[in-house]
């Protein structure tokens, strides 16, 4: 009988950890909870770097560019990063610094994929500008025209122009107090 209770308690503990893990990660990444001491990696001081010059006219500035990329990489304490420069629709330089995978010692390459994060805002507004140019979207259209299953009825008042200008009234994800949203965001 005691063995059954022990198994039940252990199962409930694992379930509780599984349920609370996204909440812990959310607050740890906000700096409001400490990271657990295991699983952390130290970024090596010496990091690989590489560059490809596609246009010889840019050879002189390529050295400056890779040095600036390396300095920025160290300044923000990123594991790795890459950058590219193009002109007249052609790639002229690409550089990489750091690690794509520290544990496996895999350096960043020009093929390494990164999350775009806030860069998606610039990509989105560029797409919106193109849609406006072709008159395929109306800035005064409510977002409910594009997404019918809005989770909050008040959001039906939000228009495209509100989203594009950060005037929608939607909370920043760090200010979100919807605890269920932590689980939904974690599963995406």
Image (spheres, rainbow, N blue to C red):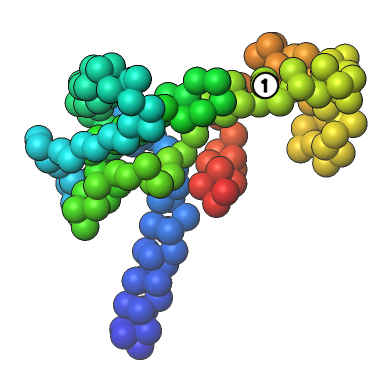
Looking at the image, how many numbered discs can be counted on the residues?
1
Q: Residue at x 25, y 17 (%)?
A: 60
> 50 and 138: which one is in front?
50
Residue lying furthest front in this view? 56
The residue where tag 1 is placed is 126
Q: Position of residue 185 (x, y in %)?
A: 56, 43
Q: Position of residue 178 (x, y in %)?
A: 59, 34
Q: Quadrant of residue 52?
A: top left
- For disc 1, the neighbor class at 10 Å (few under 14, some 14 to 19, many from 20) is few
Q: Is residue 84 left or right of residue 78?
A: right
> 34 and 149: which one is in front?
149
Residue 21 visible to an observer of this rendering? yes
Q: Is residue 148 left or right of residue 130?
A: right
Placement of the N terminus among the 4 image quadrants: bottom left
Q: Residue at x 51, y 47 (%)?
A: 186
> 160 and 48: which one is in front?
48
Q: Residue at x 82, y 18 (%)?
A: 132
Asked if 95 appears above or below 161 in the picture, the reply is below
Secondary structure under the numbered disc 1 in the rendered image: helix
Q: Position of residue 72 (x, y in %)?
A: 26, 21
Q: Residue at x 39, y 46 (%)?
A: 112
Asked if 47 appears above or below 30 in the picture, the reply is below
């Amino acid at each position: 009988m005691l063995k059954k209770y022990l198994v039940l308690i252990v199962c409930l503990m694992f379930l509780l950890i599984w349920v609370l893990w996204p909440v812990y990660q959310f607050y740890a990444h906000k700096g409001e909870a400490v990271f657990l001491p295991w699983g952390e990696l130290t970024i090596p001081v010496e990091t690989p770097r590489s560059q490809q010059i596609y246009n010889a006219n840019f050879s002189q500035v390529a050295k400056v560019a890779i040095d600036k990329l390396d300095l920025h990489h160290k300044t923000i304490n990123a594991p790795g990063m890459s950058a590219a420069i193009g002109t007249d629709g052609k790639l002229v330089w690409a550089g990489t610094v750091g690690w794509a995978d520290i544990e496996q010692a895999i350096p960043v390459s020009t093929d390494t994929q990164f999350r775009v994060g806030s860069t998606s805002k610039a990509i989105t507004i560029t797409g919106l500008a193109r849609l406006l140019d072709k008159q395929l979207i109306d800035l005064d259209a409510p977002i409910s025209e594009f997404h019918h299953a809005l989770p909050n009825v008040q959001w039906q008042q939000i228009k495209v122009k509100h989203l594009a200008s950060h005037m929608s009234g939607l909370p920043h994800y760090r200010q979100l107090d919807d605890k269920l949203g932590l689980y939904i965001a974690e599963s995406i």
